[in-house]
Amino acid sequence: MARVVFLNGAFLPADEAKVSVMDRGFLFSDGVYEGVGILGGHLVDNEPHLERFERSMREIQITNPHSRAEWTRLEEELVRRNGVAEGFLYIQITRGVAERDFMFPKAVDPTVMMFTQAKSIANSPAAETGVAVITVEDQRWRRRDIKSVSLLAQVLAKQAAGDAGAQEAWMVEDGFVTEGGSSSAFIVTKAGNIVVRPLSNAILPGITRKSLLRLSKEAGITLEERLFTVQEAYDAAEAFLTSASNFVLPVVSIDGRPVGDGKPGPLTQRLRHLYLDMARVPAEAAQ
Ligand SMILES: Cc1ncc(COP(=O)(O)O)c(C=O)c1O
């Protein structure tokens, strides 16, 4: 099936969807985005994703062109048109097309684009084996809470991971892990507590992170929301990452050192199953 994308109000074959070279997303990375997982043809945690998207738009003063209900309808229509049972939906909005000038243009419509990607999330091989991560210096700006399309630091970090035979980079600032290039970072202490960095401008408020913390609390698992060092991560009993496109993935090595016994940890696997059970229930049925 040829991919259908959404661009500025229309559902189009991907090769007919064109954006101007003067788009501010292209020239300045002047835009924000969102990524939502799809399982069983349903968008997972879509409400909090749209809430974060609305906040990102507000933070950079892009006028939101759609209501929550309209966004939802457009997203669901795109998933349906592409027949995606499992995968990922990407939404991007930029400030629009204008003569190149740093200051905001006046009376310009934003550019709105969405596409889907099919991907195995529930039965991904990485969930069985776990992934390797490396640590790199966090080179990003100071508003990492905004889901900006400016991802050059993450591109370089994740490429360095790939070059080292790893699947993710954990970024480090002042000796403390901030987050993964495209995921939230967690460790499990030898006492069985989950440790995750608290929300601030230093990290993206992960939606999967938020759901996972709720599920952990419900399961009676002790949570420590605090900074952790690279050394603590090396010494952890388990480690894992979360993201909309992977849910919960075990981390089995950090900078080439095995985490615990070098296999996906039991608490990580339990949390992955709790998350999957939640994600399998469509949102409307869960209410
Ligand atoms: C930098 C960063 N942190 C964390 C996440 C995980 O967020 P979520 O669970 O909302 O996908 C992402 C996802 O793309 C990310 O890019």
Image (cartoon, rainbow, N blue to C red):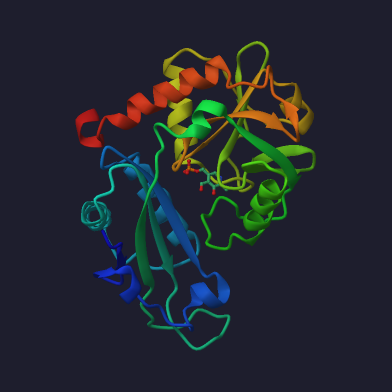
Q: Is residue 77 left or right of residue 129?
A: left
* Count of all numbered marks drawn on residues in the image: 0
User: For the point 21% across and 57% down, which residue is it?
Assistant: 81
**In this picture, is 28 found above or below 245?**
below
Image quarter in which the N terminus is found:
bottom left
Left or right for 238, reference 110:
right
Rendered view: 230 above or below 205: above
Look at the picture and state if 166 lies above or below 70: above
Q: Is residue 287 visible?
A: no
Q: Nearer the viewer, residue 120 or 45?
A: 120
Q: Position of residue 99 (x, y in %)?
A: 50, 89
For the residue pair 40 and 170, the one nearer the viewer reads as: 40
Task: Tell me which residue sits at (21%, 52%) in the image.
Answer: 80
Q: Quadrant of residue 194?
A: top right
Check the picture and name the quadrant holding the C terminus.
Answer: top left
Image location (x, y in percent) of residue 219: 44, 14
Q: Is residue 178 left or right of residue 111?
A: right
Based on the displayed image, in which of its 4 quarters is residue 215 positioned? top left
Q: State the residue at coordinates (48%, 84%).
A: 22
What is the x, y in percent for residue 188?
A: 63, 20
Q: Residue at x 75, y 26 (%)?
A: 234
Which residue reaches farthest bottom? 99
**Would you identify the image quadrant in which residue 91 lies?**
bottom left
Give the percent coordinates (x, y) of residue 113.
Answer: 36, 66
Q: Nearer the viewer, residue 218 or 167?
A: 167
Instruction: For residue 49, say whether it is visible.
Output: yes
